[in-house]
Amino acid sequence: MMVAIALLGCTTLLWAADISSPVRYIEQSFDVLHYDAFLALDSLPRPILGQSTCTWTVRWRRAPDTLRFHLRSLRVERVEYLAQGSTLPVQWFERGQPSDATYHYAVGALPQHRAGDTVQLRITYSGTMTGEPVRNGLSWGGVQQEGSIVYALGVGFYNNYVSATQHWLACYDHPSDKATFSLAFRVPSSYVVASNGEELPVRDSSQWRIYRFRSRYPAATYLLTFAAIPASVLSVIRDTTSLPVPILLYARRADSAATARSFRLLPAMVQTFERLYGAYPFEKVGYVMTQKGAMEHQTMISYPTSLARTGDTVNLIAAHELAHQWFGNCVTPYDFRDAWFNESFATLSESLWQEARAGYRAYLELQQRKIAAYLNQYAKAGSPLYEGVLTMYDFSRTPPSSNYPHVIYEKGAAVLGMLRYIVGDSVFFGWCRTLMERYRYGNVSIDTLQQTLAAQSGKPELIERFFSEWIRGKGWAVLDIEALRIPTSQGWKAVVRIVQRQPDSLGRYTTLPLELSFIGTDTVHREVLMTSAEQTVEFDSLNAFTTIAINVGKAVRSLVLLAARPQVSNVEAAERGVLLHVYPNPATEVIWVIPTVPLQAVELHDSLGKLVRRLSARGPVALPAGDLPSGAYTAVGISEAGERTVVPFVVTR
């Protein structure tokens, strides 16, 4: 008995290993080209499917073996190949358990099938449509019922299979296999259906209405949706003049005025993103107001009714979901390890929409709010919203994380904003447009994204480090900042020592852009790219300043925290002929060696005259005092002409 159980488990694992999981893409022997589905929603408002069909058009990529399809909580009635007007019934096999992430059905190829053949498979099924399993009182993905309204959301927050279209459509429910589609929904004549793609003429009878949709643009299955709404409560707002494609808004009649107001700037949103990312990629721009959302279904976004009711014309969430039509929909990751690509760009797009409306300062302010939310809520231990410290790519989904943790939203937007600053707008947005052109209606991985930007920027080593540190890595920088304020004949200069203090588990950042603000009567902003764990930089032509701040300037917002308040110390003006200062004296934490002119070298000698360190001193050098034992020392500055200045100093503990 134990052996039999083990063998059964082994068989299941072998099958599971052959199919893509949500976080592991495996190329299949088949490629779904088109879905043609008929959904019998005869029992509305109950979420029950009468006998329904989905017919696949499939090409065998290589030697035919097995077709696989996903379907949950529904009953498979019949599977058959279609060939030359006849049907060939075939057996189907259930693989795995419903609790498995890769649970699916398998259908064998026919003996006459050959590599390169295009075949058709029809799956007939019925039953009660459901949502993802309830967790913490929430079922989000799958089919949801809200009174008399029934609608589908394409992904789940906590289900281990992520894609949730399999709750109503027999499909290969994985983002790697995009296909065109035709969808037909038979509903009682009192209902209206909103769905993806181009809407075809409705077919009426005395009892039923059949709503039909089609698209010649491939879609990942998780981006398909429907919403069945009683006509008596529905208002449809249409705009066919503002854009080359129509705009359709589906809302309750009671919410129609607020919805129209909330989406008043939608044409300008589309035009903003077209300018940044390229032409809008689909047949229409659609939003349907549902209780749960928001979800970026291709051309028919599910949008929370509660947000529409606010009448907020800025509508950042609508901008977020609209940006997905480019990032995630037009160009789609192979699997959900790269969900950061979808969500980080969409969240950054909120800030870019703000920038288009109110200028770059407004962009920076919104970016800073996102950084603060991430660091102070989602990544802060003890916060009720804490989700752990996660990577953006291939993040852990173990609670308190989920399929869509905030690390890929707020942190993702901050990271992309830093990347925009480092490479510049021309390269950054050129990269976005290149992705949309080169991989249009296709799939990408993190490696593809990195390689494309490396080529676009001409800086492959910098881009490799950035992706490794910020996207594949986890965390943020924690900084200690110490500065010396030095008077000069041209005003003031600052020598600033910046040290990364974050735990070793978070790594060290060599692609960290910073903007330091020297605050005094007049504030001066200076920018620096931190490329090492400890860095000393010098800034000239400053006004008198009393403190230093970060993330308050006019250029960039970075994902950093301060370990302590920045320390600013004064250095007296140098006497004539003195080649260097050693500061402070005595030194306990840091020893600053500050040449007044470029020196050939600085030698440090102990009390016995022994050389303990030789420094190249073209500019200021900061040494940890802990590198030297306590005691008396002398610093000898040697000029290019061989002149020497001797400065005694003491190291204490």
Image: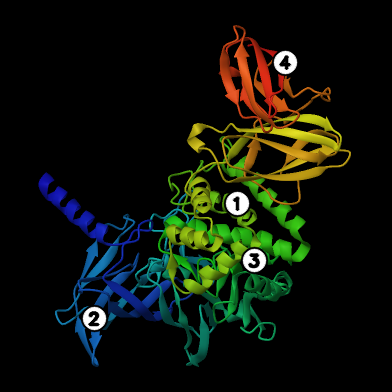
Label 3 secondary element: helix
**Circle 2 crowding by C-alpha within 10 Å: few under 14, some 14–19, many from 20:** some
Q: CA distance from mark 3 to mark 4?
A: 57 Å
Which element is circle 4 on? loop
Of residues 518 and 501, the one nearer the viewer is: 518
Q: Please give left or right for residue 211 compared with residue 383 in the image.
A: left
Give the labeled residue for mark 3.
319
Q: Nearer the viewer, mark 2 or mark 4?
A: 4
Task: Please state which of the two labelled residues, at mark 4 or mark 1, is closer to the viewer.
Answer: 4
Asked if labels 3 and 1 touch by Cβ distance under 8 angstroms, the answer is: no
- Where is 218 relative to 409, above or below? below
User: In the drawing, what numbered circle is on residue 55?
Assistant: none
Q: Nearer the viewer, residue 97 or 580?
A: 580
Dot 2 amino acid type: Glu
428 lies left or right of 592: left
Q: Secondary structure at mark 2?
A: strand
